[in-house]
Image (cartoon, helix red, strand yellow):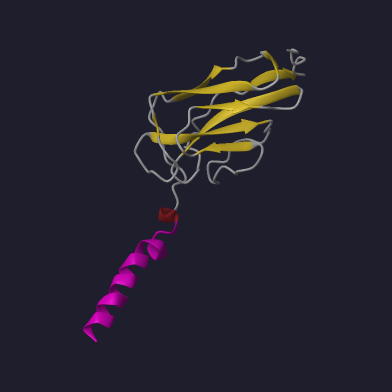
Amino acid sequence: MKIIYCAALAAALALLPIVLLPGAAYSQGKAAPKGAKLYFITPQDGQKIRGGFWVRFGLRNMGVTHAGDDYQNAGHHHLLVDVNDPIDTKEPIPQDKSHLHFGAGQTETFLELPPGTHTLQLVLGDAKHYPFDPPVASEKITVRVRQPGPVPRR
């Protein structure tokens, strides 16, 4: 009987933060340190690119970690491709072909986009993919992708 009582008490205590503080279950609204800056190392705004290209992420005054790791002053990268909607700090960053997640702590990627003009923006997410508040985001840049050149014959 004592074991059942202890198990019930442990379960009730485990649920207490969820019942009393519903917002505590989420990381939304986490503040970033002052001076945090997210930026593109490459490519540069306005760059014309032929075929696939490397995108390298820069971050100052914060650390990069894996998704799910809740370290202070750290997060992981998200690359937004052709996204016009503003960043909503109360919602996790979606994961789809326009919202690329780098939850393993990556700081670069090889990107292949169809020919045309594209916008790119970096957003740092916390352990649960929520943007910081205010968002730690790069300036939005524009790149123009051209058709790849012919493959040389041997």
User: What predominant SS class does the magenta segment belong to?
Assistant: helix
Q: Residue at x 77, y 19 (%)?
A: 147
63 w.r.t. 2: above or below:
above
Query: Does the magenta-highlighted stretch encompass residue 72?
Result: no
61 w.r.t. 71: above or below:
above
Which span is picked out in magenta?
A: 1-22
Query: Residue 132: where, in percent of width, then height?
Result: 47, 37
Farthest-out residue, bottom: 1
Query: Does the magenta-highlighted stretch encompass residue 8?
Result: yes
Say which quadrant the C terminus sits in: top right
Q: Is residue 14 left or right of residue 77?
A: left
Say which quadrant the N terminus sits in: bottom left
Q: Nearer the viewer, residue 27 or 43?
A: 43
Q: Say which quarter of the image contains residue 83.
A: top right
Q: Say which quarter of the image contains residue 4.
A: bottom left
Query: Residue 46: where, in percent of width, then height?
Result: 67, 14
Q: Residue at x 59, y 36 (%)?
A: 100
Query: Residue 128: where, in percent of width, then height?
Result: 47, 46
Q: Nearer the viewer, residue 26 or 75?
A: 75
Query: Residue 99: where, in percent of width, then height?
Result: 61, 38
19 w.r.t. 58: above or below:
below
Q: Nearer the viewer, residue 111 or 125?
A: 111
Q: Residue at x 39, y 28 (%)?
A: 62
Q: Is residue 70 left or right of residue 85?
A: left
